[in-house]
Image (tube, rainbow, N blue to C red):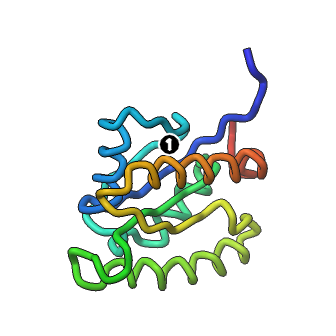
Amino acid sequence: MSDEFEPLIIAFCCNWCSYAGADLCGVSRLQYPPNMRIIRVMCSGMVHPNLVVDALTKGADGVIMCGCHIGDCHYQNGNERARDRAVTLDLLLQDMGIESERFKLEWVSASEGQRFCDVMTDFTNTIKKLGPSPYRTH
């Protein structure tokens, strides 16, 4: 049995692109770390910063938000809103003493199953290097 730290990662994925990319990853039998708990949202722009902060302060070791590429949002500019919120989140997390690397925003389209796997693997490895969240209770 390995004593290596296995992080808990919350992934907010937009319905139209990144969640479909995750689905393509699965049906293509590609693998990514099992540390992800995917939450499907209609648009990355609908993920309020409080959801990210709540996840990170209630036990998640990392949070990744994935949306449509800029210019491809099904809600016109939702991903631009997500990008703006990510900048604010970075500053907020620093003020809270949480490493900004524990949050990431990525663009993954429905046709990018391999990219979804790569992004999730890279993010998991980053969180493993950081170690457990200071808010983790177990």
Q: Residues within 10 Å of mark 1 (few under 14, many from 20)?
A: some
Q: Name the residue: 72% across, 64% down.
A: 98
Query: Based on the displayed image, in which of its 4 quarters is residue 8 positioned?
Result: top right
Question: The N terminus is located in which quarter?
Answer: top right
Please state which of residues 1 and 54 is positioned toward the viewer in this rendering.
1
Please state which of residues 75 and 47 is positioned toward the viewer in this rendering.
75
Query: Based on the displayed image, in which of its 4 quarters is residue 128 positioned?
Result: top right
Q: Where residue 106 sits in the image (x, y, percent)?
A: 49, 66
In the rendered view, does 85 fall on the left or right side of 42?
Answer: right
In the rendered view, does 64 fall on the left or right side of 93?
Answer: left
Q: Amino acid at mark 1?
A: Met
Q: Where residue 37 sits in the image (x, y, percent)?
A: 45, 43
Q: Element under label 1?
A: strand
Q: Name the residue: 52% across, 34% down.
A: 34
Question: The C terminus is located in which quarter?
Answer: top right
Q: Which residue is mark 1?
A: 36
- Height in image: 65 above or below 24? below
Please state which of residues 27 and 7 is positioned toward the viewer in this rendering.
27
